[in-house]
């Protein structure tokens, strides 16, 4: 099945770009096609990325309007969604209909440093303030709880004793760019599925699966991860 992927972002969309670049590298073997970019901000940098890639883009007038968002996605034939720095809560009408096909990337090792209000540099400041020795990126399925869906995979980075928030953020962002496109790829191939009881089922040795492009960082894919913490 060729999935039609919607990419949601509120800002510059660097993770959107990572997915666009990964899709281009896959070429004809890609099991998904970027079909729509959605943002809640009229001046979001992701709009320029969408235009450069010739992907249709929409600015939401009412991000909390679940029926309208669902109708928009249906009109574009969307079968899979990747939240990539999207800061609004996704309405339940959408999380329910795209259950198991709706992903998010978070800039910490969930369940640590997740939940409402934990995004961007707020996460990295909290990591440093807690004296953590490692951080990283997590990709998870999305449900009705902020950062609460079943974890699919993680990419870890070291936290240095002299780290600034910006330095740690840059290191984690590189991990996100490696992890997220490969996770989208794996879900699109059916190598990762969401079980009826809210767990991520991952095929064995997914990080080394021949279909995935080589990664510059070590990726961990976590089978049978509980959906809530």
Image (tube, rainbow, N blue to C red):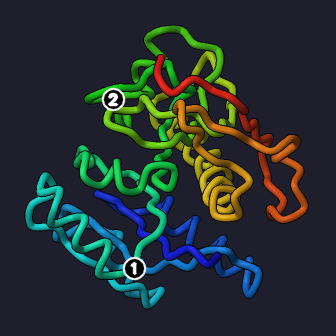
Nearer to us in this view, 19 or 98: 98
In terms of image quadrants, where is residue 35? bottom left
- Residue 219 drawn at (x, y percent): 76, 41
Give the label on residue 118, or none.
2
For residue 176, side relative to residue 144 (left or right):
right
Q: Secondary structure at mark 1?
A: loop
Where is 34 relative to 152, above or below?
A: below
Name, please, the residue furthest toward the front: 196
How many other residues sit within 10 Å of disc 2, few (<14), some (14-19) or many (≥20)? Answer: some
Residue drawn where x is 41% and y is 32% of the image: 147
Residue 85 location (% of width, % of height): 38, 51
Disc 2 vs disc 1: which is toward the camera?
1
Q: Quadrant of the N terminus?
A: bottom right
Pointer 1: what residue? 77
Residue drawn at x 48%, y 71% as measured from the top left: 5
- Vertical position of residue 14 compared to residue 55: above or below: above
All told, the count of numbered labels is 2
- On screen, residue 77 versus residue 30, left or right, reads left
Q: CA distance from mark 2 to mark 1?
A: 31 Å
Q: Residue at x 71, y 64 (%)?
A: 189
Quarter of the figure with residue 76: bottom left
């Amino acid at each position: 099945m060729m999935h039609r992927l919607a990419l949601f972002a509120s800002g510059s969309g660097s993770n959107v770009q990572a997915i666009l670049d990964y899709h281009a590298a896959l070429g004809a073997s890609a099991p998904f096609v970027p079909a729509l970019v959605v943002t809640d901000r009229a001046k979001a940098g992701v709009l320029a990325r969408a235009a450069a890639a010739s992907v249709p883009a929409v600015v939401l007038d009412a991000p909390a309007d679940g029926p309208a968002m669902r109708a928009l996605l249906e009109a574009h034939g969307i079968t899979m969604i990747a939240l990539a720095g999207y800061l609004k809560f996704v309405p339940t009408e959408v999380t329910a209909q795209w259950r198991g096909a709706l992903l998010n990337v978070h800039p910490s090792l969930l369940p640590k440093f997740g939940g409402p209000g934990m995004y961007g540099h707020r996460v990295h400041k909290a990591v440093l303030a807690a004296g953590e020795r490692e951080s990283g990126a997590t990709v998870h399925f999305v449900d009705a709880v902020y950062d609460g869906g079943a974890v699919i995979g993680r990419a870890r980075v070291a936290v240095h004793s002299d780290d600034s928030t910006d330095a740690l953020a840059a290191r984690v962002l590189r991990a996100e760019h490696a992890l997220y496109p490969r996770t989208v790829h794996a879900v699109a191939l059916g190598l990762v599925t969401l079980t009826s009881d809210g767990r991520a089922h991952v095929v064995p040795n997914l990080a080394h699966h021949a279909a995935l492009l080589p990664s510059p960082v070590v990726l961990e894919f976590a089978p049978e991860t509980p959906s809530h913490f």
